Image (cartoon, helix red, strand yellow):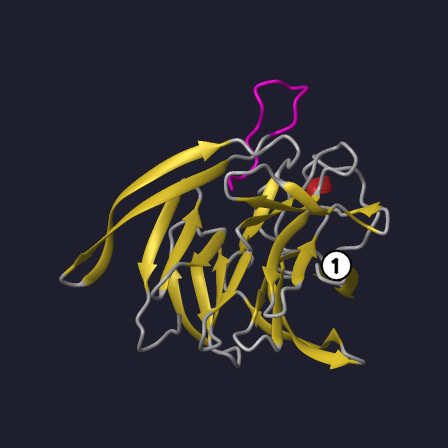
Amino acid sequence: MSDLLQSTSSSALPAILISKILLQRDRGVLGDYIPEVEWMKLRPPSSMPMPAGACRYRDGILFCSQGALTPNSGGLWYMPWGKPPTPILTAYFQKPFNSIQSVVEDQHGALWFTDASIGFEQEIRPKPKLPNQVYRYDPATRDLRAVADGFSRPMGIALGPDGNTLYVTDTGAARPNGGNTDTSSSATIYAFDVAYRSGAPFLINRRVFAYVKEGVPTSVLCDSSGNVFAACGDGVEIWNPVGTSIGLIEVFGGCTSICFGRNRELFICAKQRLWWVQLDNTIFGT
């Protein structure tokens, strides 16, 4: 998904475009490589305005729609391959979400997601009726619960490889107008233990996992070894499972989104550029 693209009309809201990228793969002496890329820019369906994060889900993609000024326009939307999107969630007990940012599916099929008032700050959403929180939704039972609060602006979310640790980024240091970050505010990755009480999961033992070196952590991932990757102002910062910094993939100007492909490959979104990185299997998991 793109950043907000300003409309040519002063009466219209900004727009966000979805990029569909087709990779042509080949194999050479040094391993797999991508000789050609086809890049298509698409407008999201009108029913799913201002998409933010997304994840693979069932037979399609689950999108986080930030919404617009109209009621019931934000939430989680499921788009099966070749079909229009359908809403899964648009509100928390009749109160509309602020601007859902990121979502991850756990090993039981439940969805964990972050909701922050970014849309209101950017004047694309009404005044919030909910705090900035993390939620969990179980599609099988339709149980929706707020599971963590106390954030300035929660954005990225990821689960550890065993599903017992949840990571949430707080980007309170970022300025809505795109100015310099406020280094006295949160640019932090928090870790929680996923514990079960009476058969239901709760988040306990909130702790600071890492405070990033540059910018804010807008996206976060875990590999199969438990290493944590975050998109930051200097590129992709990497920590081991105990929070010790172990590396940096430098990206000039920083990056905003990252995702794993196959065979230990990492894709990095940085403004108008998409980077492909092949990770070393002696250091990082898949």
Q: Secondary structure at mark 1?
A: strand
Report the side of 171 relative to 130 (left or right): left
Query: 11 or 54, which is in the foreground?
Result: 54
Q: Where residue 98 sits in the image (x, y, percent)?
A: 75, 46
Query: 111 or 15, which is in the foreground?
Result: 111
256 is within the stretch colored magenta: no
Up the image or down, 144 lies above or below 253; here it is below
| Residue under numbered circle 1 | 133
**Residue 12, quarter of the rendered image:** top right
State the residue at coordinates (54%, 49%).
Answer: 61
**Residue 49, quarter of the rendered image:** top right
Q: Where residue 138 sits in the image (x, y, percent)?
A: 71, 62
Q: Where residue 261 sits in the image (x, y, percent)?
A: 39, 59
Report the side of 194 relative to 44 (left or right): right
Kindly report the secondary structure that dominates the magenta region of the rendered protein. loop
Q: Residues within 10 Å of mark 1 (few under 14, many from 20)?
A: many
The number of numbered badges drawn on the structure is 1
Up the image or down, 70 lies above or below 190; here it is above
Q: The magenta stretch spans which residues?
A: 1-14
Q: Where residue 51 sits in the image (x, y, percent)?
A: 60, 41
Query: 277 or 72, which is in the foreground?
Result: 72
Q: Amino acid at mark 1?
A: Gln
Locate the C terminus by quadrant. bottom left
